[in-house]
Image: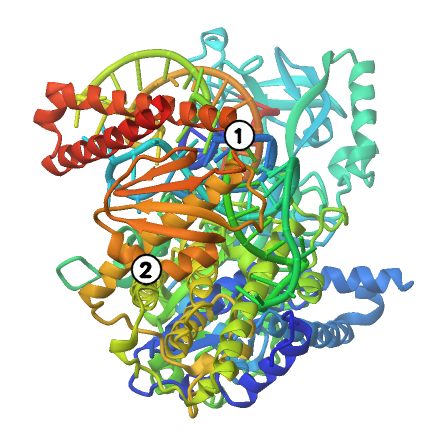
Amino acid sequence: MLDKAYDPKSCEDRIYKMWEDAGAFKPESCNPKGEPFTISMPPPNATGQLHLGHAVMLALEDIFIRFNRMCGKRALWVPGTDHAAIATESVVIKKLKQEGMADPRKQLGREKLVTKIAEFVEQSKATIRSQVRKMGSSCDWSRERYTFEPSLNRCVNEVFCKMKNDGLIYRGHRIVNWDPKLQTTVSDDEIEYQERRDPYYTFQYGPFQISTARPETKFGDKYVVMHPDDKRYKKYKHGETFECEWINGKVRATVIKDPASDPTFGTGVMTITPWHDHIDFALAERHGLEKEQIIDFDGRLLPVAGEFAGLPIEKARPMVVEKLKEKGLLVSVKEDYVHNVAVSQRGHGMIEPQIKLQWFIDVNKEVVPWKQDSAGLLPRSLKQIMHSVIHHGDIKIIPERFNKTYFHWIDNLRDWCISRQIWWGHRIPVFYCPKCAADKGESEKIEKGKLKMENDGSTSGIIVSAKAIDTCPHCGGKVEQDQDTLDTWFSSAMWTWSTLVDSKLTGDPSLSLEEILKRSPDFQSFHPTSVMETGYDILFFWVARMILMTTYATGQIPFKTVYLHGLIRTRDGRKMSKSDPETMIDPLDMIAKYGADALRLSMIVGQSPGNDSRLYEEKIAGYRNFINKIWNASRFVLMQCEQKGIDPRKIENGTLKMENLSIADQALLCGIDRLIVDVTKGLEEYRLSDVGDRLYSFVWDFFCDWYLELSKGEANCAVLIHGLRTILQLLHPYCPYVTEELWAQVAADGSPSLISAPWPKAGKTPKEFVQAFDQLQVVIDAISSIRRLRAEQQVEAGKKITVTIHSKKHAKLLESQRSHIERMGHVGTLVIDAKPAKHEKVASAFLKDVEVHLSLEGLFDVGKLKASLEKEQAELSRYVQGLQGKLKNKSFVDRAPKEVVTAEKAKLAEAEAKLKKVEETLLR
RNA sequence: GGGCAAUUAGCUCAGCUGGUUAGAGCGCCACAUUGACAUUGUGGAGGUCACUGGUUCGAGUCCAGUAUUGCCCACCA
């Protein structure tokens, strides 16, 4: 016999091992003819711990996978981890520093540091693996991947070369986001803005006044920009120069007229710093202006700053202001000027835009062959492809409103800088031959104002190769590899397909990428993947880039559906943060305390795609209670079987003897059929919260509260077992552990474990079952009203009472259910009479076609009785009046659909009948 | 500055394409403990669905505007 309460701790690990040992997570264990269903697990960073974001991701994906597996599809869920380049390297460096190493990069050197990081990552991976298992995730561990493994490196190199050959990757001097703290470039998406209050200075600059919050960048200023239509400056001509006193003496400045200058902002005149500002850079490009570096890569001023050279910018700022003030050039200072500063998401360092020779992906170049609506292939840009697959519905985003966000992001997308100056990551597969470069007289020196901006195909001495090489194919000289690594998203962008290529093939250097793909069985079977489920916060970082990279590299979309979940927040809607441990909920603690099933439900029910949800411990406890309810319901069913000497495992599926079914049995079977339909449809439509809710209330409010209670009189074990089995099947994707544990007790002999069991199908529900469902409702209503009358009249809980029921329509039915009504209503004497009669000293309830009278002989309180009747009379009168008004309204009767009018009429008749009864009773 | 969303019971949220007297969980109140379950059962109280207009026979639901809150994008030198 089962224990009194469900104990997740004693089951979960054991069951997970059982599944894994049986190979249940592999698609090979599914129906070989089944259609494939694939999910690529968004790889957690191999840096630390599983958090709630992962937990919700795992829960959702596991539901998708388990449902589809049970439906007979060949379900594959590929797990893995991400090497998370910048994040991981900075975590390890921070750790080493804490351990006392002053400058790990310098002290260890590249090779040793990479080894250290790799060791750390291996440990983290092990942690993540065990935590993913704790959630019950049914992913195929034999196919586990890692974004930084050799096989993926091969894919990365191949794609890089392909893009380079197609002219989609170029090298050039562009303005990039430089993180001085981490000493690397970061992409536009990796910076965030922080609001700051700083003084805002206005200076005299020749005849003009200019304002800035960053005077320390102004050393190189030699252009003043104003709007061409600004009347105030009409007399100054574009291109004219003037001399003026500036920080370190006299400078010659040039007037530039450009519409980028906003005449309504400040004085309408600005100076520009093209080397350290995106907008200024673009402006300088338009007019062919000189660009000069003011700040070095450590955030210190360069010799152009004269006496300030070598100072960190924060220190130099007040000094520069002081100097200008002494010179009488400071016009005004506005304190507490509110502006935003760019900060690196990872290192939290202040971003300093810099011009740097870097590798970029050209998102606008139209070279990729892509399908047209009707005709053949047309060259498209990566941007256009990204737009097209969503626009034409090849990929569907849930919720749909994110389409708009996505399109907006694409519209503003600039070329993507993919090179990083860190060591942890895929090395850029580019080699330099110094000899070839020298022969052609090319140098990498940057001349002021003449930066190489074009796609850099012409540069000599650059060899792009997917294979590592030592010698130059042209001159035989020794080559050096590019020191930089790729943006981590470059490799994760290939995740859906690079994880499906055969690692034996990627080891063969003679094969092309096309051939590798063609000959990789998993890629052929399981790509495109079915659903990409991830947080909406990662739509741009990852989802968009996967679309870009996969459509380009494989010609296939990466996934058919994108399901975006929201963030899990605290009870009062705050973000959970590590720095505030009070607010943090650790999924593993919650699993230890309430079980994985309860945690899963608590994150799924009440959570809708794209919206944040709140989680708190009472919620999880609530679902723990529900899990326990399922447990005890099963315990009851098993006890019933035991009492009757029936072994549930001997009850075969689908062998119900139709002739012995009670009304309750039939109603349950009807309810189960309806449940199957709703749950199946809901899961197909990704309405996970709805479905969870539906299951919850079916199990608790119908199966337990009514069906099991009714079966206490006369249990039909076959029906009980059938109902329970179906419930366990339907619940399995949501709470895999408890259902599997119970399945072992109730499944027919020879059944597979629940994870591999088929999804239940709803047959055609017989008419009499549907009728029984409605009939049972009449009985339920009768019992409920008896209970309500008892409570209202404050009848002692255990006291047996006398009840008379009149119902012309349902007398026979109610008579057949007499024992249930007596037992569940604690009725001592029950009179059921088709003919209505007048009663004295009763409390009455008037239901549809049924009157229930509770005798108050010896226990009544007339005052109370009258009050409650009057209350009911008032409510009914109001309702009846409302309906009458509606039906008297000619336009309603004329214009509303007939069914609606008929329904309203029926309601009115019923309410009027009820009201009449109440009033008759009151008159006595 | 641009965009997106939310606003329903004390709290957390459902309410699909407009049509019963607006629902659930938690919390609250009253009662109940030999028999699946106190991680329980029975009954109850509690809401002018943010506001103002509009469309409609009919609006929590559709439209417009207002307010408040949250998020995303842009980045005014």
Crowding at dot 1, Cα within 10 Å, few <14 / some 14-19 / many 20+, comes out as some
- CB of mark 1 within 8 Å of CB of mark 2? no
Name the residue located 30 percent from the left edge and 78 percent from the top edge.
A35
A131 or A442, nearer to the observer: A131
Which of marks 2 and 1 precedes in the sequence? 2
Name the spot of residue A901 as percent of width and height, x first: 14, 32
Q: In the shown orientation, is residue A134 left or right of residue A522?
A: right
* Tally of numbered tags: 2
Q: CA distance from mark 1 to mark 2?
A: 47 Å
Give the residue type that dot 2 points to: Asp
Looking at this view, name the residue that lies furthest to the left. Answer: A894
Q: Going 45% across and 84% down the picture, which residue do you hit?
A: A648
Q: Position of residue A584 (x, y in %)?
A: 71, 51
Q: Residue furthest bottom?
A: A750
Secondary structure found at label 2: helix
| Chain under numbered label 2 | A
Residue A40 at x, y = what percent?
A: 46, 70
Q: Quadrant of the N terminus of chain A?
A: bottom right
Helix, strand or loop at mark 1: loop
- Residue A889 can be seen in this image: yes
Residue at (78% x, 42% y) in the render: A300
Nearer to us of marks 1 and 2 is 1
The residue indicated by pointer 1 is A861
Crowd tier of the residue under label 2, counting other residues whose Cα lies within 10 Å: few below 14, some 14–19, many 20 or above:
some
Q: Please give the label number shown on residue A678.
A: 2
Residue in the foreground of this view, choosing between A704 and B70: A704
Above or below, comparing residue A694 to residue A717 in the picture? above
Image quadrant assignment for residue A303: top right
Quarter of the image containing the C terminus of chain A? top left
Rendered position, A263 above or below A657: above
Q: Amino acid at mark 1?
A: Asp
